[in-house]
Amino acid sequence: MKIAFIGLGNMGGPMALNLHKAGHTVQAFDLSKPACDKLAADGVAIAASATAAAQGAEAIITMLPASQHVEALFLGSNGQPGLLAHIAKGALVIDSSTIAAATSQKVAKAAEAEGIDFIDAPVSGGTGGAIAGTLTFMVGGTAAALERARPLLEKMGANIFHAGAVGAGQTAKICNNMLLGILMVGTSEAIALGVANGLDPKVLSEIMRRSSGGNWALEKYNPYPGVHENAPASKGYTGGFGTDLMLKDLGLSQENATAVKASTPLGGMARAIYAAHSIAGHGGEDFSSVIKMLQKQG
Ligand code: NAD
């Protein structure tokens, strides 16, 4: 299939590579030259612009930071037309970015008016899952559009869920990430407490992993350096899921909670903690660096 892939960051880069390896004709694009160069070195064709990538594509996949990037790309900005004007009728758009459900619905409506199918398909599984092709996709859209997307999603992920109509994938994703943000703070607190008492972080983490406190961070993404060799914590908190992206997701969950009058006290507290961590200069580091706020320094 001829695919345009736009947004080649920590997640989009390996996802586009998996589609290329599966034999699809991928035309990739990112505003960042280093991101393009990295993928070109793996043999993926780089287009000169998003418009050039989308030319004649049967599927357009986006993996961008936030709502404003997705809206500006598809609907246009500063009086310039968006990408929808350049996409062939009958094509399928798969947006895997984590954004506001309302933005997904706005873009989907405009796509429908142009005869283009749209699904929101945010993911979970981290950069490890993107590289291994084992992501979980949470899809919002019609069952028919999901079936069109499924062969592509299967090359990038291991679990595909139909959450509901357009936007429902995003709602599922912000519920998941609110829990992830909370559990990373809790896991960091527990490890920092043990270490302050002289415990070995590896031994303590293993005890908790096999006990009732076991969770995804303790399994795969330990916030303490040196516990998991491949986790961002062991790579100077680089290459994972940025603190500012987590902050964005916690903001989305709190906006949503306000709209539906839901009570999410720990989600609100987690948002405040990541905000303080970002203000302290850690916004570009992986979100597991939040342990630095809770550790005894020196
Ligand atoms: P990233 O910052 O590493 O990559 C985003 C890329 O988008 C950058 O390379 C940037 O240059 C590019 N970009 C921005 N605007 C663009 C435009 N108009 N045209 C082309 N390229 C553009 O972010 P990421 O970690 O890959 O995350 C992407 C999305 O996936 C976010 O919404 C994030 O919340 C979500 N997500 C991330 C993870 C993770 O572990 N990193 C996991 C699940 C979901």
Image (tube, rainbow, N blue to C red):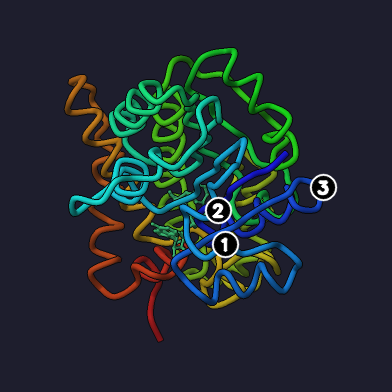
Which one is in front, 267 or 89? Answer: 89
Q: CA distance from mark 1 to mark 2?
A: 5 Å
* Among numbered discs 3 and 2, the one appearing first in the sequence: 3
Discs 1, 2 touching: Cβ within 8 Å: yes
The quarter of the rendered structure image containing the C terminus is bottom left
Q: Residue drawn 64% across and 28% down?
A: 149
Question: Which label's residue is closer to the chain start, 1 or 2?
Answer: 1
SS at mark 3 in the image: loop
Q: Secondary structure at mark 1?
A: loop
Residue density around tag 2, few if under 14, some if 14–19, many if 20 or more, within 10 Å: many
Q: Nearer the viewer, residue 36 or 290?
A: 36
Quarter-of-image position of residue 101: top left
List the residue tagged with mark 3. 23
Mark 3 crowd level (few <14, some 14–19, many ≥20, 10 Å Cα): few
**Can you say which quadrant of the picture contains the N terminus?**
top right
Q: Amino acid at mark 1?
A: Ala
Q: Amino acid under label 2?
A: Ala
Query: Could you tell which of marks 1 and 3 lies nearer the N-terminus?
Result: 3
The residue tagged 1 is 47
Residue type at the position of mark 3: Gly
Residue 198 lies, in percent from the top left, at: 54, 72
